[in-house]
Amino acid sequence: MEKIYRTSQFSRHAPGRWTLAPLEPILHASPWRLRLLGLASLLGQPLFGWIWSQWLVQPYENPWLRGLMSLLGALLLLPALSRDFSNPRVRLFLTLVMWIELPLFFSWMYLRNGGSAAWLATVCTMIVCYYHLTDWRIATVGIVSAALVSWALQVLLVPGAPHGSAVDAVVILFSWGCALLLGLSSANLRRDQLAHTLATMGIMAHELRTPLSTAGLIGEAMQMEARREPGHPRTAKLELLGQRLHALVRTMNHQIDTQIVNAKLLQLPRSSELVAVAALVRDIVLNYPYGSTRQRECVRLAIRNDFIFFGSTSQFSQVLMNLIKNALHSLAAADSSYASGALRIEVDCSPTQGRIAVADDGVGIDPVLLPHIFKPFFSSNRSTGHGLGLAFCQQVVRSAGGTIQVKSGYAIGAVFTVILPIAPGETQPSPEF
């Protein structure tokens, strides 16, 4: 099959480029963490509204504003928000809610209360909590923007109202500086731990080459011995064992290649190739090291419309390999007979976006696990998974300006969909079947 991946003459490739970690609106996101945040806002807003208005009375309190903040907290309890934290709309919504609930609301209340001691302490506490709840980059932009918006609203709506003092500003800046340093150090610590673990995995994968080379030589020796005595009763058995050993070595080498590529999760090279999806997918499906003929025959490829995008051929080859491997593992876990079409790959596009869908009829993924499957080292199958494949896939897809989504449920299979922006001016005719 002719490979027509078409590399642009203006492609850039810089090995060793460190990639930025994706923005996380809620660190260590999980359904329970999100629900606890929502519950804290739902119950805490009216509670502190009563405290500041009835018990420890402050200059300003607004029950309607408290009610609105409590309602926003109730929205965090919706199950739909915790099903897929990788969805861009969910991430944007969570970022906005957290910004309104914390820096915007607390900055406004601090200013409206004239910088009272109670609200000065509350704002400082909020800043530290905000940096522990969300990515430090989001927190930094959120704090600055919320302070500016609150101050502008105060000037427009309540002219002449007090805005705190220079002492308050120093205290708030000190709290902000400490929170920023803590956020930066935590992010660097997580990144260093991940980098060291990935490097160790890469070294171990390389070390496995030596025993595999020996096994390959043993397989060749067995086949050579079989050919020397063509009429011997053991000839057929030796030839079969040699073939099986060679197949095992090829499969293991493929797995090692996968681990080495996954170990470069944080050092993906920069690439802007023009990649034709149909040719790429066909080649991967044809050359994947299937474990049996039945596995190969269960795959069905449907190319509705081809498209071209800017990305990396080698990286997206590994993405497709990972998705196919996971689908075959899911089918095996479901005791599948590998019926025709049990694994389906579809390529299609709209005028602006291309889509690659990999669907299987396997065991599926528990909905509780869906928010975590793209995290490094998280695996829904601890007996066979290392938890890097999907994290690598997500990083590669995001580097091309796309998204990867999943729909699944226990015992109903899974559908992974990669959505990519089509390269401007690059269109492909629909293939004929």
Image (cartoon, rainbow, N blue to C red):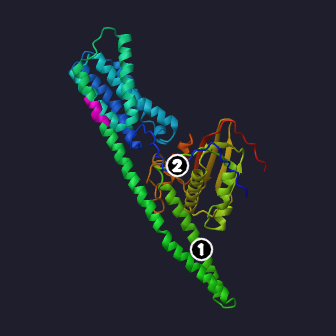
- Asked if the residues shown at circle 2 and circle 1 are in contact, with their CB atoms under 8 angstroms apart, the answer is no
Q: Nearer the viewer, residue 188 or 372?
A: 188
Q: Amino acid at mark 1?
A: His
Q: Which residue is mark 1?
A: 246
Q: Which residue is mark 2?
A: 269
Residue 372, percent from left and from top: 45, 48
Q: Amino acid at mark 2?
A: Pro
The residue lying at 66 percent from left, 88 percent from top is: 228
Can residue 69 be seen from the camera position used here? no
User: Does 270 sit above or below residue 328?
Assistant: above
Main SS of residues in magenta? helix
Quarter holding the N terminus is bottom right
Residue 342, percent from left and from top: 64, 57
Q: Counting other residues with Cα less than 10 Å from the Cα at mark 2, is it few (<14), some (14-19), or many (20 or more)? A: some
Instruction: Tell how many labels.
Output: 2
The residue lying at 56 percent from left, 55 percent from top is: 322
Magenta range? 174-180
User: Does 250 sit above or below residue 124?
Assistant: below
| Disc 2 to disc 1, C-alpha distance | 32 Å
